[in-house]
Image (cartoon, grey):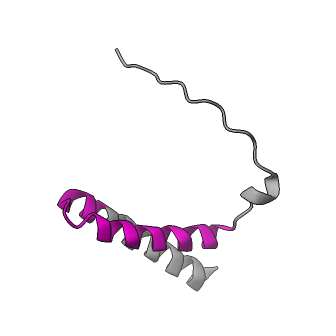
Amino acid sequence: MSNVIPFPARPRQDESDLDIDLETAVDVAIRDLRDLAERLRADSAGHEQAKECLLMLERALDNARAYG
């Protein structure tokens, strides 16, 4: 049986703080994944997973820019 850990509810942020377009979100995720992939060099499985995710997001962003 699993053990469910309840997390305290976070206070709701102002809606304007949550607005971000998809292109910006993907661009930020790509930057963060580059940093993460570098930090995971010692963990080959984690490093590879981060690199694959990075490549997927880069392709998606390139396609969105080309066809959007």
- In percent of width and height, residue 3 lies at 40, 19
Residue 51 visible: no
> What residue is shown at x 76% (from left), y 58% (from top)?
17
How far across and down, in percent of the image, does residue 30 sit?
A: 47, 72
Residue 68, above or below 14: below
> Magenta segment range?
21-49
Of helix, strand and loop, which mostly describes the magenta segment? helix
Location of residue 31 in the rendering, given as x and y in whole percent from the top left corner: 47, 74
Q: Is residue 32 magenta?
A: yes
Q: Quadrant of the N terminus?
A: top left
Of 10 and 53, nearer the camera is 10
Compared with 15, 54 (above or below) is below
**Does residue 28 show up magenta in the picture?**
yes
Displayed quadrant of residue 52: bottom left
13 with respect to 64 (left or right): right
Quarter of the C terminus within the rendering: bottom right
Give the vertical position of 13 relative to 55 (above or below).
above
Query: Would residue 33 appear left or right of 62 to someone viewing this image?
Result: left
Q: Position of residue 29 (x, y in %)?
A: 50, 67
- At 54% from the left and 71% from the top, the residue drawn is 28
